[in-house]
Amino acid sequence: MPKGRRKPGDGAGKPAPSTLSHDEQLAAAREAALRLLTVRERSSVELRSRLRQKGFDREVIVAVVDRLQDSDLQDDGRFAAQFAEAALGRGMAGRRIRAELRARGVAKETAAEVSVEDPDSELARARELAQRRASRMGDLPSETVVGRITGLLARRGFDPDTCRLVAFEVAHSPVLDPAVPRDLP
């Protein structure tokens, strides 16, 4: 077994879930799920996957996750909203947020709903991110700045047209021109 990977039941003197009775598995799975949700909100797919990694039976996992959803302790809509808010704060575009949520098992409609953003504000975020990054690029040639900014914006999920437009604007901005004194308004 690779270093760092543990078998179910290893550590802390706990038996493997498969050796427990059904009721004991339910209690242990619920406890494990609550610990996971205490750290951060998770999608139901993430929660099921983590419980499966811990060695719980499929029926137990389904029962525990369903019960958590019924009691509103786990909610994919809430997870998606929190994820989207944090991702926007990190400069991700709506397209990337949608893709990340889909990869985490959030329904297509929910992912689309929480990642919708006004195109003008998304363009403004792309410009702000590009300007911040370009300000640290010193005296690099404008072609290099364009390439790096385009790559940065593409990795954050902005569409190709936005990437090219914003990168070109920022690279050819007089603020970055070394011939223009920085103290001018």
Image: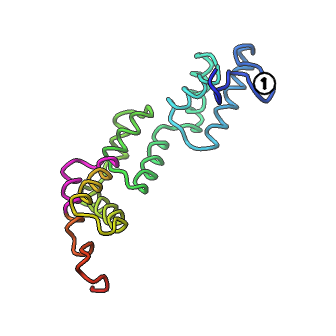
The residue labelled by disc 1 is 14
> What scheme was used to colour the molecule?
rainbow
Q: Residue 122: within the magenta?
A: no
55 left or right of 84 in image: right
Q: Which residue is situated farthest in the bottom direction here?
A: 184
The magenta span reads 154-168
**The N terminus, quarter of image:** top right
Q: Report the residue at 62% width, 43% height from top.
A: 39
Q: Report the residue at 63% width, 19% height from top.
A: 60
Q: Report the residue at 60% width, 32% height from top.
A: 68
129 left or right of 180 in image: right
146 shown above or below 11: below
Q: Residue 164: within the magenta?
A: yes
Q: Where is residue 89 in the image (x, y as percent from the top left)?
A: 43, 57
Q: Where is residue 80 in the image (x, y as percent from the top left)?
A: 44, 43
**The C terminus, quarter of image:** bottom left
Front position in the image: 16 or 149: 149
Q: Where is residue 162 in the image (x, y as percent from the top left)?
A: 21, 54
Q: Position of residue 35 (x, y in %)?
A: 67, 37
Q: Amino acid under label 1? A: Lys
80 left or right of 163 in image: right
Front position in the image: 117 or 67: 117
**Mark 1 nearby-residue class (10 Å; few <14, some 14–19, many ≥20):** few
Principal secondary structure, stretch drawn in magenta: helix
Front position in the image: 183 or 75: 183
Q: In which quarter of the image is residue 91?
A: bottom left
34 left or right of 99 in image: right
Mark 1: secondary structure:
loop
Q: Quadrant of residue 126?
A: bottom left
Q: Which residue is situated farthest in the right direction here?
A: 13
75 shown above or below 180: above
